[in-house]
Image (cartoon, rainbow, N blue to C red):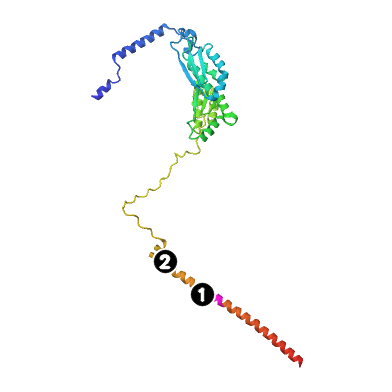
Amino acid sequence: MSSKLGRYKNKPNKQEKFSNKNKNDSKKELSEEIGKDEIPGWVKGTGKYTEEDNPDRLAAETSFVILFPEYREPYLQQIWPLVQATLSAKPYLLNATLDLKAGKMFIATTEHTFDPFIIVKGRDMLNLMARGVSLQQARRVLEDDVFSDVVKIGNLARNHATFVRRRQRLLGPDGATLKALELLTDTYIFIQGKTVSVIGGVKSLKVVRRIIEDCMFNIHPIYHVKELMIKRELSKRPELVSENWNKYIPQFKKSVQPNSKVKKTKKPTEPKKEYTPFPNPPEESKIDKEIASGEYFFTRGQEEEEEGCKTQKATRRKISREKSGEEQNFDSSSRKTETTRTRVRKEFSGSH
């Protein structure tokens, strides 16, 4: 029964079929009524969106609120008249206000606004200015082929030290790496705090976002710079347009593997001991082990013999020293007695 129900589960109803037919018929009628020459330029991508494309203006008002940090307050207060002048001029016709007490910027459409997407462009412009981008660069977002992206990099590193070190890699020595990325991708990149603001085309924004995220994941941007330089040279050759460029692009491999991929040797697990309610027996000391093996008495007898031999040798040395000292004293006394006797004999013989 379930298999039979499954056959008719995804089939449309009669009403859905009828509505789809009506939609297809209406599309055919519109395509027949509107000729190819009557299709507006902004649909083809060759022209701009003008007032003639939307003569009735917008049906409702659209507004956005953008927060800005405190350190941007002096700059925004100084530059705000120019911001209002650019947004209120044709063809944008937007209304912008600045609230310094609340730290907010307001942007809204007016009754004269005819472009429904220009409010999003104005919001992006104010977002860039809140992140530290100057007005000269932020106003480029109002153009049709220019877009912006704010990449958050604060949570892509494990600690603050690695975050600062990898953010510095994007800048490079004296900003050389950042300048190379801007030239190769035809974008404007601005690093401020924990965000990176990018202004450029859609494809370029995707490339720059990938480079920034890879840099925060410990892949140096110089590898991407080399890859972009090779692709730029290959794009100049018309015979290589249809070929695969992977064989021309160098593949960089990491020399040091991360700790997660290193196989760790497992320590041998010790068998679990059986549970006993009694406490463990006391461990035998070194003397107890020697007494049990008989080594204690053997070593003790040897030590006593060695001590006895040492004392005997010491007594013999002492006795020999005493004897040698007595002999020396006897020899000196005998010599003295001999000299006195001879002297007396000589004196006696001389007197007679």
Kind of residue at badge 2: Tyr
104 or 112: nearer the viewer: 104
The residue identified by callout 2 is 296
> Is residue 160 rendered magenta in the image?
no
Q: CB under 8 Å between callouts 2 and 1?
A: no
Quadrant holding the N terminus: top left
Farthest-out residue, bottom: 352
Residue 100 spot, x, y in % from top left? 52, 20
> In which image quadrant can residue 136 be found?
top right
For residue 17, what is the image quadrant?
Answer: top left
> Which residue is situated farthest in the left direction here?
1
Residue at image location 39% in from the left, 65% down from the top: 291
Q: Which residue is mark 1?
A: 312
Q: Residue at x 57, y 22 (%)?
A: 74
- Residue at point 53% right, 12% down? 88
Q: Alpha-carbon distance for marks 2 and 1?
A: 24 Å
Residue 147, can we see it? no
Residue 315 in magenta? yes
Spot occupied by residue 111 in the image (x, y as percentages of width and height): 47, 9
> How many numbered marks appear?
2
Is tag 2's residue or tag 1's residue first in the polypeptide sequence?
Answer: 2
Q: Is residue 299 above or below residue 148?
A: below
Residue farthest toward the top in the current orientation of the protein: 33
**Magenta stretch, residue numbers:** 310-319
Q: Is residue 52 visible?
A: yes
Left or right of 260, for residue 220: right
How packed mark 2 is, by other alpha carbons closer than 10 Å (few <14, some 14-19, many 20 or more), is: some
User: Height in image: 33 above or below 285?
Assistant: above
Is residue 134 left or right of 283 when viewed as pictured?
Answer: right
